[in-house]
Amino acid sequence: MKNEDLVEELIRQKYITSERVKQAFLSVDRKFFVPKDVKSRAYYDDPLPIGYNQTISSPSIVATMLELLDVNEGDKVLEVGTGSGYNACLLAAMGRVVYTVERVPQLRDFARKNMENCRFHDKIMLILGDGSVGYGVEAPFDKIMVTCGAPEIPKPLVEQLSPGGRMVIPVGSTFFQELYIVEKRDDGIYRKIWGDVAFVPMIGKHGHRWA
Ligand code: SAH
């Protein structure tokens, strides 16, 4: 199997519906972002363990979230939960610049190493810290993608959205959440629920207190 086979399957199952997301998935090979012991499963539509009780999400949910987020060429993007760095590279393939925040130092290092294989790594700023407070020094962001489950929508993330900006974020318990699409418009903040998802918990000031 190769990365193209994964992309073809995601298109066939209608997780990938836009040319933009398709091109991003074709240009970022998932095998560079999974640990050695699970490389043989890189092109299956499954989440995989990356250590420290964390996972790289299944490609279908990544594709779904990227379609919902609708990242454009000029976008300044914030990701909360770098993990393997896979999603950050996909975002960098579509946007102008990506700030991605990870709280586990070893995963930050894992992501940095994986990203060497990504031709968009110059557009990615890797930050170690608590992403539940966003990344104020670089705000506002046109798009925010949260890849860990928050107990509620963190206020700082809403504040750090540009006018007209959009955020996708799993909100709920430590294991099951609903995926929210949050939009900041002239007349207020709008929220839509996409459906049920299962992410690892967001741990931090505006996240869960316990893993
Ligand atoms: N997007 C990743 C998968 C995310 S797994 C990928 O493409 O591989 C979720 C990640 O969120 C984990 O690495 C976890 O350590 C991180 N995380 C949890 N709470 C966080 C917080 N408050 N700030 C930053 N990262 C956090």
Image: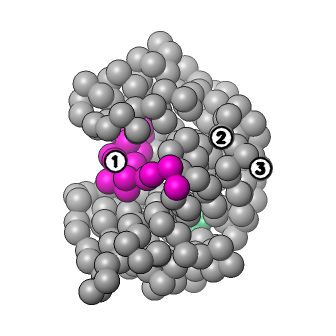
Q: Is residue 60 magenta?
A: yes
Q: Say what amino acid the circle numbered 2 marks.
A: Phe
- Say which element carries label 2: loop
The disc, 3 or 2, on the residue closer to the chain's N-terminal end is 3
Q: Position of residue 37 (x, y in %)?
A: 63, 27
Left or right: where 188 falls relative to 163? left
Of the two numbered discs 3 and 2 in the rendering, the one whose residue sits closer to the viewer: 2
The residue identified by callout 1 is 67
Q: Which mark is residue 109?
A: 3
How far, Cα to Cα, is label 3 from label 2? 17 Å
Tell me if residue 168 can be seen: yes
How far, Cα to Cα, is label 2 from label 1? 19 Å
- Residue 69, image quadrant: bottom left
Q: Residue at x 58, y 53 (%)?
A: 96
Mark 3: C-beta under 8 Å from nearest atom of ligand 1: no
**Badge 1, how many Cα within 10 Å: few under 14, some, many 20+?**
some
Of the two numbered discs 1 and 3 in the rendering, the one whose residue sits closer to the viewer: 1
Q: Which mark is residue 112?
A: none
Q: Which residues are magenta?
A: 58-74
**Badge 3, how many Cα within 10 Å: few under 14, some, many 20+?**
some
